[in-house]
Amino acid sequence: MPLNLPNLLTWMRIAMIPGIVGVFYLPDTMMTVSEKNLTATALFIAAALTDWLDGYLARRLNQTSAFGAFLDPVADKLMVTAALILLVELDRTNAVVAIIIIGREIGVSALREWMARIGEGRSVAVNVLGKIKTISQMVAIPMLLYHDRIFLFDMSQLGEWLIYVAAALTVISMFYYLKMAAVPLRR
């Protein structure tokens, strides 16, 4: 495992997950609900920004590695999964939405692994639709964690709409990846 700045940022993103979740288990005498919401939101946004930063630095510093390419999406999936489970527990999103998003992540990861084993990993490489799905999740989740108003904007309502968009994009992108995998499998 190469120890470089991009990989350290990825490990840092993973290490932030217990903080995002754990803040909601603190006694209300330590932090108000609003403070918990704000803290979890700030941690999630910081973690999401490291996702962009580690990739940028890996390319810029020429520190890409097979381990980093493996760990980065794992960190993303862990972070999104933990946040979605937390949001379901807090009754801020629908369990069906969480199941769709988490199930797709597991399914597409398994599909990518299978395709890589048969030498067809490129057929299910990340595409623009998958990136848009990820962006919509990474914007919706902090809104749902914040769960309050910012000026005239009800973040929880905006987050709810956006998480449904993310779930729809999740299903569409899953079918896209299945279609792309079907081509080499038919040969």
Image: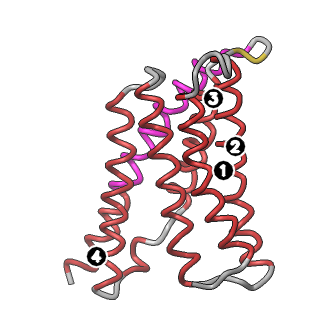
Q: Residue at x 58, y 21 (%)?
A: 27
Residue at mark 1 to residue at mark 3: CA–CA distance = 13 Å
Label 1 with label 3: CB-CB less than 8 Å: no
Q: To which residue does mark 3 refer?
A: 143
| Three-letter amino acid code at the position of disc 1 | Ala
Q: Residue furthest top?
A: 152
Label 1 with label 2: CB-CB less than 8 Å: yes
Q: Earlier in the sequence, mark 4 or mark 3?
A: 4
| SS under mark 4 | helix
Residue at mark 1 to residue at mark 4: CA–CA distance = 28 Å
Q: Earlier in the sequence, mark 1 or mark 4?
A: 1
| Three-letter amino acid code at the position of disc 3 | Met
Left/right placement of residue 108 relative to residue 157 reads: left
Q: Which mark is residue 45?
A: 2
Q: To which residue does mark 1 refer?
A: 48
Magenta span: 153-175
| SS under mark 2 | helix
Residue 34 position within the rendered picture, expressed as x and y whole percent measured from the top left: 68, 18
